[in-house]
Amino acid sequence: MKCMICQSKETEHFNTLDKKAYWKCDGCHGIFLDSIHHLQNNAEKVRYLEHNNLVDDPRYRKFLSKLAVPLKTKLASGSEGLDYGCGPGPALADMLTLDGFKLNLYDPFFFPDQEALIKSYQFIVCTETAEHFYKPFEEFNKLDALLLPGGWLGVMTTFLSSSDDFESWYYRRDPTHVCFYSEETLQIIADQRGWSLEIPAKDIALFQKKAL
């Protein structure tokens, strides 16, 4: 089994939980669900619609500010970005627009605008999305191609920790969550693409593409 995150062949069966097989990569220290257990598109969309992520919900906006606040310190005024995997309620895009940034939206289920994927961006935000990637190695390559040199990619996802009880971990139990990243995993993702990595807070990763 090749690692879906880093493409290493240093993988081993990690556990079988709820009749689902999980694999662990010794190369990047990530864990991923066997692809035979991935949901079909219609079931995946139904699950996303169960999320109560409203654009004007102050609690949701405060949650997203964990990424927005440190990212904004890296960006020039008026920078153009992409909210990748924004879901049905693109609250972060709304927040950043109010701060003077220009945002494009893309989500395969709710904003499937292919035009947004042929542009180049000074920054990309990817909040509570990377854990849903069925092909994370390819997805991160796509994000790299969309970023201008010197651009920033902000990722929010709950980090995998050795102190977590994986079996009972709430994050694993969401059927749409298929990839789990430790800080070491994120560093490997950065290294493979020549990015730098900063972790300004728990569950927040800021990658910067190398400038020309």
Image (cartoon, helix red, strand yellow):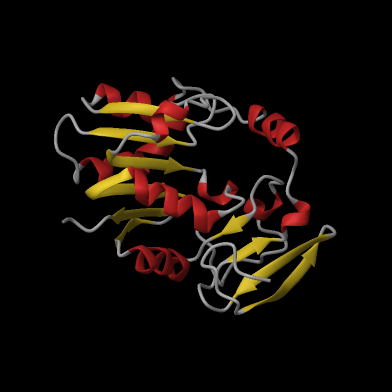
**Residue name at image x 66 percent, y 58 percent:** 169
What residue is drawn where x is 56% and y is 72%?
162
Q: In this picture, is 177 found above or below 197?
A: above
Where is residue 87 shown, x and y percent of the image? 53, 30
Q: Is residue 132 visible?
A: yes
Q: Residue at x 37, y 41 (%)?
A: 125
Residue 108 occupies which quadrant of the picture? top right
Looking at the rendering, which quadrant does residue 119 occupy? top left
Report which quarter residue 79 is drawn in. Answer: top left
- Position in image of residue 98 (x %, y %): 27, 22
In the depicted structure, whether residue 176 falls above or below residue 111: below
Q: Is residue 158 visible?
A: no
Residue 191 position, x and y percent, is: 35, 69
* Horizontal side, residue 97 vs residue 88: left or right: left
Q: Is residue 68 above or below residue 10?
A: above
- Quadrant showing the N terminus: bottom right
172 or 132, which lies in front? 132
> Viewed as shown, does residue 94 lie left or right of 172?
left
Q: Quadrant of the C terminus?
A: bottom left
**Which residue is located at x 78 percent, y 55 percent?**
36
Question: Can you name the residue that lies furthest to the right here?
Answer: 19
- Disc tally is 0
Q: Height in image: 117 above or below 10?
A: above
* Frontmost residue, 81 versus 52: 81
**Rendering coords of residue 27 (x, y %):** 52, 77
